[in-house]
Image (cartoon, grey):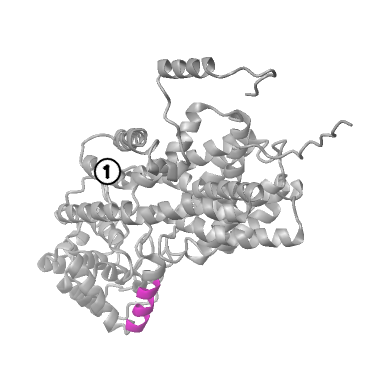
């Protein structure tokens, strides 16, 4: 009687396209961090040649890169669980995620601190002498603004008697003469201007008051003068920050702002001045709470390795999800729920919930970053949605590739419509905003950000599935090496950014140098020192070093000649 063979149910094969896409998401991190010194935003290194283009490049990549990464991570986590079970999942994730995080905290992160502190000290010394050569938005115009900043009291009195407008805003930054006196640390000029009717609450272009500047720069004596003149301590600027909030701005951001203002600064003096202002305002108890919050949630314990820490939390959460599915005996998820365009009807509103708590103090395109000892709840929830969707998507068994099928429509829509509209909301001035009621600005802004992240993530998955559905050796190598490149890139990026900082070359050329040298150097280190070592085994699993062609041929011939032939065919 012949045996009846029952074929196993079809299973999802290894997604080589998603392997490659996850690698691209990680490598884009090198591009993103390399661009930061050339963008007019706070960063450890401030290049002499900056361009708004790099701000747009940073915003574009940041808007989708990590959501895409966590989505794919959720997919592969579900795949591993379904194939091997929870115990194997925990063992594999401990080896691939937790252990590299622990090793990185003892090697890469200390090195990054040393590099960052050394560069900051060198830049502080240079910036305090006003050596940054790029055009500043705080360049001081001639006239009453200039004499207010320099504290030329005789000339200031002359201009006041001549009828100068004490509340006039200069074209570049919108600061008033009183604001310039604050920036220049001229208490006598502040006294004179207030005496003759200067408004202590006159706003600059970003709606900051002179007291905002005094708090940023730790001008304790001037802050006391302004408060006595009834300056509004609760006034909010365009970043929803009050003068009191400005007392808590981190030092890298403070250094960048002070450098842009073209004013001399000293970290100890600024911090001491801020403490005096805080004490005079009676905010000591609040400051203790803020300091504790900052230590737990904001202090950069993990730096760029925060994503590994998040994955540890998400895997624990996934275990609860997996146990629930097992108890309910749920094996599949309906495709219409995850793979069809109907997914946006629940994904977008759900993702807008955590996004609504981000970008409040410092508006930016994309999610906030959480690098502290404890994840910021809204950021963890945000990425948990993408991670969870990836797990759901695996269980819907989208063999036909419905997700992202029309990527050639969704990707251009995200790139050429959603992203520009999102940047318009950040910059805050356009006919589009004027035609939209103000109470709807925030809602529209959140919708655009979230929809951009989802359309790019799903569209990219569809594009890679369509174009890279078969394994290629080159992409396999990139996928393997990307983990190491991302883990190790930050110290090298900072060093290279500092080296080229004052080179008289176009920003795009210097960015290419930083990005290219970093990538090539780390690829060489991966091939020589990581790929076939215990570290490569830890990161990617064992990789067998290829044998020379002659050796491999001889070995194969030797095995064949000494292997006895069987009566039946040998299985390969």
Report x, y in % for residue 515: 34, 37
Horizontally, residue 510 falls left or right of residue 156, namely right
Q: How many marks?
A: 1
Q: Nearer the viewer, residue 287 or 217?
A: 287
Residue occupied by mark 1: 497
| Span colored in magenta | 284-293
Query: Is residue 160 in view from this perspective?
Result: no
Q: Nearer the viewer, residue 103 or 551?
A: 551
Dividing the picture into quadrants, the one containing residue 209 is bottom left
Q: Inspect the magenta stretch and tell me whether residue 18 lies in it.
A: no
- For the C terminus, which image quadrant? top right
Query: Is residue 381 in view from this perspective?
Result: yes
Majority secondary structure in the magenta region: helix
Q: Nearer the viewer, residue 431 or 209?
A: 209
Report x, y in % for residue 480: 46, 37
Horizontally, residue 567 falls left or right of residue 56, namely right
Residue at 22% in and 78% down: 195
Dividing the picture into quadrants, the one containing residue 298 is bottom left
Residue at 43% in and 26% down: 546
- For the N terminus, which image quadrant? top right
């Amino acid at each position: 009687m012949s045996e009846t063979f029952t074929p196993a149910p079809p299973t999802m094969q290894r997604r080589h396209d998603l392997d490659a896409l996850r690698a691209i998401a990680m490598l884009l991190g090198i591009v993103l961090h390399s661009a930061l010194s050339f963008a007019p935003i706070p960063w450890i290194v401030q290049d002499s040649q900056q361009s708004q283009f790099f701000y747009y490049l940073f915003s574009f990549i940041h808007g989708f890169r990590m959501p895409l990464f966590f989505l794919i991570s959720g997919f592969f986590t579900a795949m591993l669980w379904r194939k091997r079970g929870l115990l194997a999942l925990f063992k594999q994730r401990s080896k691939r995620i937790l252990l590299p995080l622990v090793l990185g905290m003892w090697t890469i992160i200390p090195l990054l601190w040393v590099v960052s502190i050394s560069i900051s000290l060198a830049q502080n010394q240079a910036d305090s002498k006003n050596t940054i050569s790029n055009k500043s938005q705080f360049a001081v115009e001639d006239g009453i603004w200039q004499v207010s900043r320099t504290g030329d009291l005789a000339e200031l009195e002359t201009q006041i008697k001549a009828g100068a407008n004490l509340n006039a805003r200069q074209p570049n930054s919108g600061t008033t003469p009183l604001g310039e006196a604050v920036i220049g640390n001229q208490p006598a000029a502040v006294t004179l201007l207030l005496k003759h009717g200067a408004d202590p609450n006159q706003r600059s272009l970003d709606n900051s008051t002179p007291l905002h500047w005094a708090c940023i720069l730790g001008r304790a004596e001037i802050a006391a003068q302004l408060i006595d003149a009834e300056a509004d301590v609760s006034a909010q600027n365009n970043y929803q920050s009050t003068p009191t909030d400005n007392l808590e701005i981190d030092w890298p951001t403070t250094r960048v702002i002070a450098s842009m203002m073209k004013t001399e600064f000293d970290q100890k003096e600024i911090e001491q001045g801020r403490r005096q202002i805080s004490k005079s305002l009676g905010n000591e108890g609040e400051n203790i709470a803020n300091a504790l919050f900052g230590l737990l949630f904001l202090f950069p314990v993990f730096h760029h390795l925060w994503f590994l820490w998040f994955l540890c939390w998400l895997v624990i959460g996934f275990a609860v999800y997996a146990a629930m599915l097992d108890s309910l005996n749920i094996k599949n998820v309906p495709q219409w729920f995850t793979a069809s365009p109907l997914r946006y009807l629940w994904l977008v509103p759900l993702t807008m919930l955590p996004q609504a708590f981000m970008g409040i103090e410092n508006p930016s395109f994309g999610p906030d970053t959480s690098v502290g000892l404890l994840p910021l709840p809204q950021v963890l929830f945000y990425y948990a949605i993408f991670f969870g969707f990836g797990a759901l998507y695996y269980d819907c068994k989208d063999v036909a590739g419905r997700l992202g099928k029309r990527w050639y429509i969704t990707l251009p829509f995200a790139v050429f419509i959603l992203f520009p509209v999102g940047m318009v909301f950040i910059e805050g001035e356009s006919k589009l905003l004027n035609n939209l009621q103000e109470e709807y600005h925030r809602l529209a802004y959140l919708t655009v950000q979230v929809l951009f992240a989802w359309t790019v993530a799903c569209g990219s998955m569809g594009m890679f599935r369509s174009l890279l559905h078969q394994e290629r050796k080159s992409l396999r190598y990139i996928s393997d090496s990307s983990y190491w490149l991302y883990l190790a890139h930050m110290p090298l990026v900072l060093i290279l950014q500092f080296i080229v900082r004052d080179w008289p070359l176009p920003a795009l050329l210097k960015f290419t140098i930083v990005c290219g040298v970093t990538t090539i150097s780390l690829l060489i280190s991966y091939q020589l020192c990581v790929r076939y070592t215990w570290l490569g085994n830890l990161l990617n699993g064992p990789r067998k070093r290829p044998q020379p062609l002659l050796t491999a041929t001889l070995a194969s011939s030797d095995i064949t000649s000494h292997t006895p032939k069987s009566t039946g065919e040998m299985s390969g």
